[in-house]
Amino acid sequence: MNAFVMLFPASGVETWVFLPPLVALIVSSFTSLGGVSGAFVLLPFQMSVLGFTGPAVSSTNLVYNIVAIPSGVYRFIKEGRMAWPLAWTIVAGTLPGVFLGYMLRVRYLPDPRDFKLFAGCVLLFVGARLLLDTAKPAHAPGTAAAELERKFADQARRTGERSASGLPIGAVVRTVSITFREIEYEFWGERFRFSVPGMLLLAGVVGVIGGAYGIGGGAIIAPFCVAVFRLPIHTVAGAALLATFMTSLAGVAFYSFVPGPAGQTASPDWMLGFLFGIGGFGGMYIGARLQKYVSPSVLKRLLGGLITALAAGYIVQFIVR
């Protein structure tokens, strides 16, 4: 049995070598359905279960994103559900914030106890947004979102069973117009639009939080795109994952090469991050492949409950100690 236990010198973690990829596979299979890489779950797992609490845990989490996300992005592109203008708008707003998030992490949140409070507040915010969104009444009749829900329900009824239903082959994203003020695109016969300045502002804030927390930001921006900008989750997921991948690349570079206040970097544990990424690579593909068959409201309730529970645990730990 000891032959399967591995010590990771960079982080000091000693664990069963198959545990990181197995956990990442399970987590990402579910979270990628909503355009979330699952890094927001893996970071608490590394801190609480593996005992990895230094600043490098954030950069290690970003390595997981880099390895895991491409398979999911590929699947969304292949099925025509990648909203490219949305993805690049998120990237443009998020990248500057990643550097600020890195400096926040290494300068003001190096202590694991303080970082747990910060992580708990971020998780609580995300969980509350998800749960509140599912508690709201259905979309107003006549809106594009309501029409999509009706079409999805009709598709399910025609197949005779929900598990076999899903988006038709023709349900792909098509860009309608792009200006500095607004971007509009079409999906399954319905048109959706969002404010470019508003999305850039949101992405900038997400970049700061994601860079400090080591999640890339998808767990925060995906719920906002759905709840605030009223964009369909089937088009948000791919864009959120692609943006998370790009910002994770920048985040790893900052953590690896930009010195902190003591002149030290917070380079990731590459091997540990890669093992998590291997499992995530498979899970991301599975989630992206199955997304068109899953009800967004069910997924939001599941993720909202999980994230809120994790957040409560971290905040309680900070208060009690």
Image: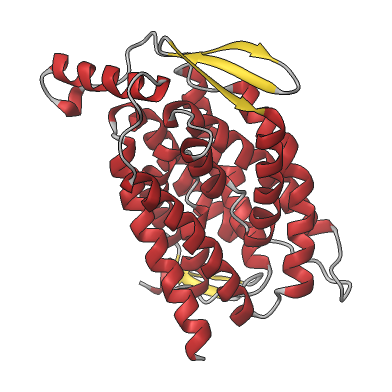
What is the x, y in percent for residue 145?
39, 25
Identify whether 64 is placed above or below 115: above
What is the x, y in percent for residue 162?
17, 27
What is the x, y in percent for residue 54?
65, 74
Q: How many marks?
A: 0
Viewed as shown, does residue 117 lie left or right of 20?
right
Residue with the most extreme left position = 160
Viewed as shown, does residue 131 lie left or right of 118?
left
Q: Residue at x 37, y 28 (%)?
A: 289
> Which coloring applies here?
secondary structure
Q: Residue at x 67, y 80 (%)?
A: 111
Which quarter of the figure has residue 255? bottom right
* Residue 5 visible to an observer of this rendering: no
Q: Nearer the viewer, residue 99 or 232?
A: 232
Which quarter of the figure has residue 211? bottom right
Which quarter of the figure has residue 95? top right
Q: Looking at the rendering, in which quadrant would you find the N terminus?
A: bottom left
What is the x, y in percent for residue 34?
42, 39
* Residue 316 visible to an observer of this rendering: yes
Q: Residue at x 47, y 46 (%)?
A: 280
Residue with the most extreme bottom position = 321
Q: Residue at x 35, y 28 (%)?
A: 140
Viewed as shown, does residue 109 lie left or right of 4?
right
Q: Nearer the viewer, residue 121 or 269?
A: 121
Identify whether 219 is placed above or below 314: above
